[in-house]
Image (cartoon, grey):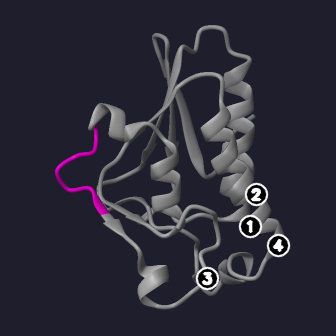
Amino acid sequence: MPYDTLKLAHVGGVSWITLDRPPVNAVTVQLLEELLHALDTLEGRNQTRCIVRAGAGTKAFCAGADLSASAGSQAHGNNRFRALGRAALDRVETHPKPVFGALRGWCIAGGLAQALETRWAELNDASQDCQEGKAAFREKRTPVFKGL
């Protein structure tokens, strides 16, 4: 399946899932659906020994939900978006293959939740410019995904 919002690449036994929604890799329903599909596909791929998740560019691993005018209605208050977000986090957490995070730039709101579900802390693989943000708390918004 070709993906529009992420890239899937394989290097030896490592499969890379890169969120690819410039400039900040904001999450949409489509991205969550594609992420779930990619994780399911990699579970059945015998050559994949582990999975690394990354964000395209240097500005953000993931800035959470896309709140732009064109996609904002998909985020807060949308039950499908919430269900897919929770399913993606649960899938990463319970995936039979280890899922690591190559974190660079901002990890905000749902992006922080995604980062926390990967095994980046075990490897201390976050780059020097990795920034965690909890804007949902500061702005008194209800987090869309679990974990924040």
| Mark 1 vs 3, N-terminal side | 1
Q: Is 56 or 92 nearer to us in this picture?
A: 92
Q: Residue at x 34, y 40 (%)?
A: 121
Image: magenta residue range: 125-131
- Tell me where residue 129 sits by quadrant: bottom left
Question: Which label's residue is closer to the chain start, 4 or 3?
Answer: 4
Q: Quadrant of residue 49?
A: top right
Q: Is residue 113 above or below residue 102?
A: below
Label 2 close to label 1 by CB (< 8 Å): yes
Do the residues under discs 1 and 3 have CB atoms within 8 angstroms? no
Mark 2 vs mark 3, CA separation in Å? 16 Å
Left or right, residue 102 beside residue 12: left
x, y percentage for residue 31?
66, 55
Residue 101 magenta: no
The image shows residue 106, relative to residue 12, as above or below, that is below
Q: Badge 1, how many Cα within 10 Å: few under 14, some, many 20+?
A: many
Among the two numbered marks 4 and 2 on one chain, the one whose residue lies closer to the N terminus: 4
- Residue assigned mark 2: 84
Three-letter code, disc 4: Asn
Q: Which residue is mark 3?
A: 142
The amino acid sitting under disc 1 is Arg
Q: Whole-Å distance between the Cαs marked 1 and 3?
A: 11 Å
Is 13 situated above or below 26? above
Amino acid, disc 2: Leu
